C-alpha cells in the first residue's frame, strides 16, 4: 500500500475519471465543482478561503490540479471566466500547496504556443498563445513556477477518453460513423497530438516516481489532423463504407482562433530516456474498443 496522499481537483471530468484506476494504491481525496455523488467533495478552486481550508485539512503529499475552463470558444467569449478559473483558481491551489508543502501537478495544453512551427513543439520552444484559453493556461503555468519549487507542469494534446463522459471530437465522430451518417467532414489543415487520458495519468504516475520536477510534454506521439483521426476511427470501427471529406478549417468558423500547429513532442522525456507514451494510433484503438464502443 502506497502511503502517499493525493488531492484531486476536477475529479469528475474526463481525465479525473481515470484517477482511481491509475492511483489505486494511493490515499485519494477527490474534489470537483460539481460534486454529483458521495465519491467527491465540492470544491470551487476560485474560492481562495475554501481551497486553503480543504487543502490544509487534507494535508496531501500531492495535488493533481485538473479543474480548468477548457471550452476554448467560451473562454474567448467570456475571458473573465477563463482567467478566474485557469489563473486565479490555479493561484489559489498553488498558494495552498505552498502553505502545506504539497507538490503540485498542473495539467496544461499545447494551446500555449502560437502555432506557426512546421514540426511538433518541444518544452524549449517559446510560448505565444493566440487565444484566451491558451493564454489563461500559460498564466497558470507561470503562477505555478513562480510560487513553487516542487511542481510538475504537464502539457497534454488533444484529449481523448472518458467513455460515457466523452463529448469531444472522437466521440462525436464515432457516433456519426456508427450511424452511417456520411459523407462526413473533417479538417485537414490543423495539427495536434492525441492524448489518451488514461496514458496521461499513467505517465504522470511514472513521472512522480522519478522526482524530476519541472515542465514536460506528455502526448501519444504523432502530428495528425482531425481528418487523419477520423480515418483511423473509421478503420477501427470497420465502417469503411462511410465517406469522409477532407476540408479546410474555413468550413468550421469558431469564436476562438485555432492555431495551425499544436502538436507536441515529448522531448524532455526522450532526453531523460523515458519513452513510455505509446503511439496515438495504439492509444486510440484501445480507447475505442475497450471504452467507447460499449457506450455507442
Image (cartoon, rainbow, N blue to C red):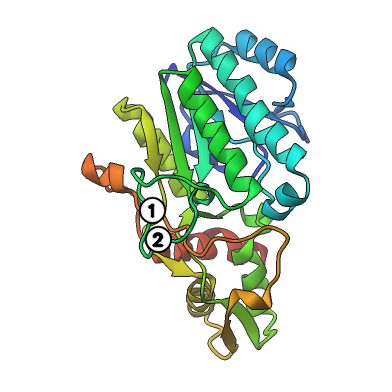
In front of the other: 62 or 250:
250
The residue carrying pointer 2 sits among few (fewer than 14), some (14 to 19) or many (20 or more) residues within 10 Å by Cα, namely few
Query: Can you tell which mark lies on residue 117?
Result: 2
Q: Are marks 1 and 2 in contact (CB under 8 Å)?
A: yes
Give the image location of residue 118, x and y in percent. 37, 65
Task: Determine whether 103 is above or below 241 in the image.
Answer: above
For residue 40, which numbered disc appears in the image? Answer: none
Is residue 264 shown left or right of residue 36? Answer: left
Is residue 158 visible in the rendered image? The answer is yes
Quadrant in the picture for residue 88: top right
Q: Report x, y in % for residue 181.
A: 70, 84
The N terminus - image quarter? top left
140 or 220, which is in the foreground? 140
Report, in whole angstroms, how far the alpha carbon at label 1 lies from the one at label 2.
Answer: 7 Å
* Residue 20, visible in the rendered structure: no
Q: How far from the left and from the top, in percent, is residue 177? A: 63, 79
Q: Secondary structure at mark 2?
A: loop
The residue positioned 36% from the left and 43% from the top of the image is: 123
> Please, is residue 148 above or below residue 86 in the view?
above
Coordinates of residue 104 in the picture (x, y in percent) = 49, 24
Return the residue at label 1: 121
Eye-nearest disc, 1 or 2: 2
Q: Residue at the location (58% across, 82% down)?
A: 247
Residue closest to the eye, 1 or 70: 70
In the displayed structure, does residue 20 sit left or right of residue 85? Answer: left
Per the image, label 1 sits on a secondary structure element best described as: loop
| Residue at point 77%, 35% (across, down) | 34
Mark 1, Cα crowd under 10 Å, few <14 / some 14-19 / many 20+, is many
Amino acid at each position: 500500500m502506497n502511503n502517499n496522499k493525493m488531492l484531486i481537483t476536477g475529479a469528475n471530468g474526463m481525465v479525473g475519471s481515470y484517477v482511481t484506476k491509475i492511483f489505486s494504491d494511493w490515499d485519494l481525496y477527490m474534489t470537483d465543482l460539481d460534486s454529483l455523488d458521495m465519491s467527491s467533495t465540492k470544491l470551487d478552486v476560485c474560492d481562495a478561503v475554501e481551497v486553503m481550508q480543504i487543502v490544509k485539512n487534507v494535508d496531501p503529499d500531492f495535488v493533481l490540479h485538473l479543474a480548468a475552463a477548457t471550452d476554448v470558444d467560451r473562454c474567448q467569449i467570456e475571458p473573465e471566466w477563463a482567467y478566474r478559473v485557469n489563473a486565479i483558481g490555479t493561484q489559489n491551489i498553488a498558494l495552498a500547496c505552498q502553505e502545506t508543502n504539497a507538490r503540485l501537478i498542473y495539467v496544461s495544453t499545447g494551446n500555449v504556443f502560437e502555432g506557426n512551427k512546421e514540426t511538433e513543439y518541444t518544452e524549449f520552444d517559446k510560448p505565444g498563445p493566440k487565444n484566451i484559453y491558451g493564454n489563461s493556461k500559460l498564466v497558470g503555468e507561470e503562477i505555478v513556477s513562480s510560487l513553487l519549487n516542487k511542481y510538475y507542469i504537464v502539457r497534454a494534446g488533444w484529449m481523448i477518453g472518458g467513455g460515457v463522459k466523452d463529448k469531444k471530437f472522437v466521440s462525436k465522430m464515432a457516433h456519426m460513423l456508427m450511424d452511417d451518417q456520411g459523407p462526413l467532414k473533417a479538417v485537414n489543415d490543423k495539427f495536434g497530438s492525441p492524448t489518451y487520458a488514461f496514458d496521461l495519468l499513467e505517465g504522470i504516475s511514472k513521472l512522480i516516481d522519478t522526482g524530476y520536477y519541472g515542465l514536460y510534454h506528455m502526448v501519444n506521439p504523432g502530428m495528425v489532423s482531425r481528418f487523419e483521426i477520423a480515418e483511423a476511427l473509421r478503420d477501427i470501427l470497420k465502417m469503411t463504407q462511410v465517406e469522409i471529406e477532407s476540408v479546410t478549417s474555413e468550413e468550421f468558423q469558431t469564436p476562438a482562433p485555432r492555431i495551425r500547429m499544436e502538436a507536441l513532442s515529448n522531448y524532455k522525456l526522450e532526453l531523460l530516456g523515458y519513452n513510455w507514451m505509446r503511439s496515438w494510433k495504439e492509444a486510440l484503438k484501445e480507447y475505442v474498443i475497450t471504452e467507447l464502443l460499449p457506450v455507442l
